[in-house]
Amino acid sequence: MRPDSVRANTLHHVYGWLLLMPAAILLIAFTHYPTVATLINSLFSKGNIVRPSRFIGLGNYEAMLDDPIFWKAFGNNIWFAAGTIPTSMILAIAMALLVNRALPGRGFLRMAYFTPTILPMIAVANIWLFFYTPEIGLIDQILETVGLQGKNWLGDPDTVLGALIVMTIWKEAGFFMIFYLAALQNISPELNDAARLEGASRWTYFRRVLFPLLMPTTLFVAINALLNSFKLVDHLFILTKGGPDNASNLLLYYIFESAFSFLDATYAATLTMVLLALLAILAIGQFVILDKRIHYR
Amino acid sequence: MSVAALFPSRLRFGDWLETTAAWLLALLWIAPLAYAFWAAFHPSEYSTRFDLTAPLTLTNFTDALSQAPFARYMVNTFLLVTMLLAAQFILCTLAAFAFARFEFWGRDAAFALVLVQLMITPEILIVENYATLAGVGLIDTILGIGLPYMASAFGIFLLRQAFKTTPRELEEAARVEGCGWFGVLWRIYIPIAKPTYLAYGLVSVSHHWNNFLWPLVVTNSVETRPLTVGLAIFGAPESGVDWSIISAATLLSVSPLLIAFLLFQRQFIQSFMHAGIK
């Protein structure tokens, strides 16, 4: 190699790193460093004026395993995900199939389905709060007119999670719809014509042809929905504050409470590690699945 | 013959059924928002009485504006999303260009480390990030709300894809014309990636207009609070504010984004698609 091109190559390395530098510094400061700091802090005891924080190994984790609120929040997260994701995905497929064809007012329909997506969760919670309010709320008023007894939907541990799930489905189905719409647009209409010629019913066509073709989209949406379900806690601040009696508490909200209400940063770090582990597992899952998807194509 | 005659009419009946279902679902979906409009534009005694002759009013909006500094909150949100978008465009462009066009030591490892942020978003690390911001004295500043999101793995990823698919011939042609690295980036790569910038920009603005948890943690004064945090404080049940006024405040907070969405529906939906699929 000529000295000239060697120097050009060295310059490439330098340029590359210089361009990356500003973003790298911020990423390290707000993603990598705090991840490591969280791990370290989770191994220390909560400090106070009398007793400074000291290394306690896995002590916080042992305390967490004995903490009924942690298990409650963790279980709620699972129920919240199980309650919102499949239903909103089924609705999303239905919406996408409905507006993928020529029908009157298609533009309006698509807008109606998608609009909740661009509203902030805080605004959504504000609107739905009034639906769920006992007695004066809209749901109870409607029930009253047909002679049924209303109830305190958000104040009852048996109904609070369900109420939040219904609201979240409303918020998210339209978002998932657009991924199915994009996928449907890539499916050749000739497949439909061929199925019709063979005499297949529309349901058979959906089950045997469309749904399998939409599988990669379904996996993609499912994993992203699962990731989101762990990050979505804004509505709790308006609707329930995690109550009643932690019946609607979620992990990230419990982390917030531990850190900023109970001022126990090391326990919050321990809880954060659980959330990080869950997200890491999902990330690896996504990687494996996307990898398969490439082979499959 | 009778079967052939029946078939099209059965199809038409199926179409009719699907159209009806689509419309019913759409009305159900728009109902909560339509209800918020109803409550906001009518006196509070009509908030659950759907009487079409009910008088329209704007007092709920003026009341909301006089009871909380929503105009200031809106300015804060506007400053936040503008500053953040500008910083994201600059930082992500430079980093994406490095990943797409430079061979440098540790490039693949560095890219993997960038992608970590796709999973571990800053709101999960609120505790540590709060400590970091406190350490540099940026608590309760708009810059502090934006800082953790400026280097966006998502933006870097999208722009890298766009830069990688740009034909090399264009770059070589520009080099012949005497362009340096910056000239090539500015004249060739950035203009070609315009649709990606638009898609990423719309997704980023919608996301940060609506973001709540991290701004709630960082801010504690009127001068820095974005709309979502201001609205959450205003609408808290213990504040005892009238329902119609809360509806008006909610609509005020979402209106800029909602109007932008209604005007540029196609671009919004396509941007969310584009950003989600890559």
Image: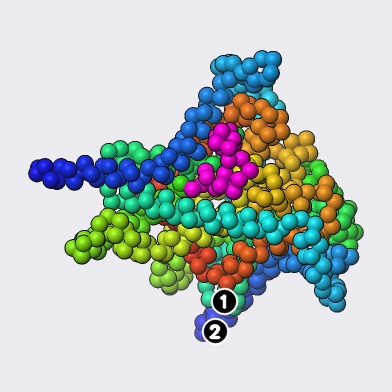
Magenta residues, dominant SS class:
helix
Which contiguous range is marked in magenta? B128-150
Between A278 and B20, the one lying in front of the other is A278
Q: Would you say residue B188 is visible in this rendering?
A: yes
The verdict on a common chain for dots 2 and 1 is: no
Q: State the mark number for residue A103.
A: 1
Q: Chain of mark 2?
A: B
- Point out residue B54 in the picture as x, y percentages from the top left corner: 86, 74
Check disc 1 and report its element: helix, strand or loop: loop
Q: Position of residue A204 (x, y in %)?
A: 50, 63
Q: Are marks 2 and 1 in contact (CB under 8 Å)?
A: no
Name the residue tied to disc 2: B5
Judge whether residue B276 can be spotted in this image: no
Foreground residue among A59 and B7: A59
Q: Residue at x 20, y 44 (%)?
A: A9
Crowding at mark 1 (Cα within 10 Å: few <14, some 14-19, many 20+): some
Magenta span has B22? no
Q: Is residue B129 above or below residue A175?
A: above
Who's the residue at 63% across and 54% down the image?
A: B76
* Residue A53 placement: quadrant: top right
Q: CA distance from mark 2 to mark 1?
A: 23 Å
| Residue pictured at 25% horizontal, 57% vertical | B180
Q: Is residue B135 magenta?
A: yes
Q: Is residue B260 above or below residue B237?
A: below
